[in-house]
Image: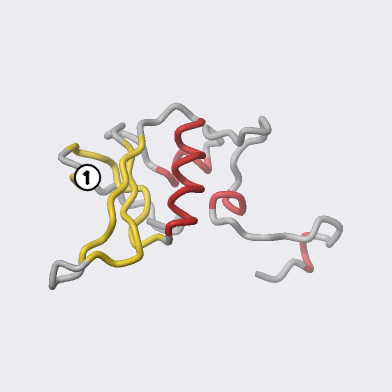
Amino acid sequence: MALSKGKHNIVEIEGVRCTLVETGVSPERMEFLKNLLVFNRYEVKAEPVKAKDGSILNSFVIGVTDIIFNPMIAVYQKKLFTPDGETVSPAFWNQWIFQENIPYWQVKL
């Protein structure tokens, strides 16, 4: 679930009802989100995505066991923190890379 969609979805991961954080993410993205959410004291569940024929794809579904958690609200209300003590911004959540000394009106995504 990207930060551009505020819909709150509940899924079952590993037999536990969870709030869906993101689906179809790479293993690297899954580790990034898992470490960030565990640092913020959420219990994280993740499982590989299965194709219709039963084979396992190289993507994951990740969720947290806190049913009222909404990633969009948590990021924009600045309720999540990085291990450095900074608040998690949308750019940090989405893993966008910015150059430090460019004025904000010249940044291109």
SS for dot 1:
strand
- Look at mark 1 in the image and give the residue it sits on: 13
Q: Split into 4 quadrants, where in the image is the C terminus?
A: bottom right
Image position, residue 15 (x, y; %): 15, 40
Identity, as a three-letter code, of the amino acid under mark 1 = Ile
Q: Nearer the viewer, residue 66 or 44?
A: 44
Q: Which residue, as the protein is rendered here, is positioned at the far right?
A: 101
Q: Which residue, as the protein is rendered here, is positioned at the far front?
A: 55
Image position, residue 47 (x, y; %): 28, 50
Task: Please give left or right for residue 33 compared with residue 109 in the image.
Answer: left
Q: Split into 4 quadrants, where in the image is the N terminus?
A: bottom left
Q: Which residue, as the protein is rendered here, is positioned at the far top?
A: 41
Image position, residue 23 (x, y; %): 33, 58
* Rendered position, 76 above or below 65: below
Task: Please give left or right for residue 78 compared with residue 20 in the image.
Answer: right
Q: Residues within 10 Å of mark 1 (few under 14, many from 20)?
A: many
User: Residue shown at 42%/44% (left/top)?
Assistant: 71
Q: Nearer the viewer, residue 8 or 21?
A: 21
Q: Nearer the viewer, residue 56 or 107?
A: 56
Q: Nearer the viewer, residue 71 or 105?
A: 71
- Residue 57 quadrant: bottom left
Label count reads 1
User: Residue shown at 62%/36% (left/top)?
Assistant: 87
Image position, residue 36 (x, y; %): 51, 39
Colour style of the rendered protein structure: secondary structure
User: Residue shown at 78%/60% (left/top)?
Assistant: 99
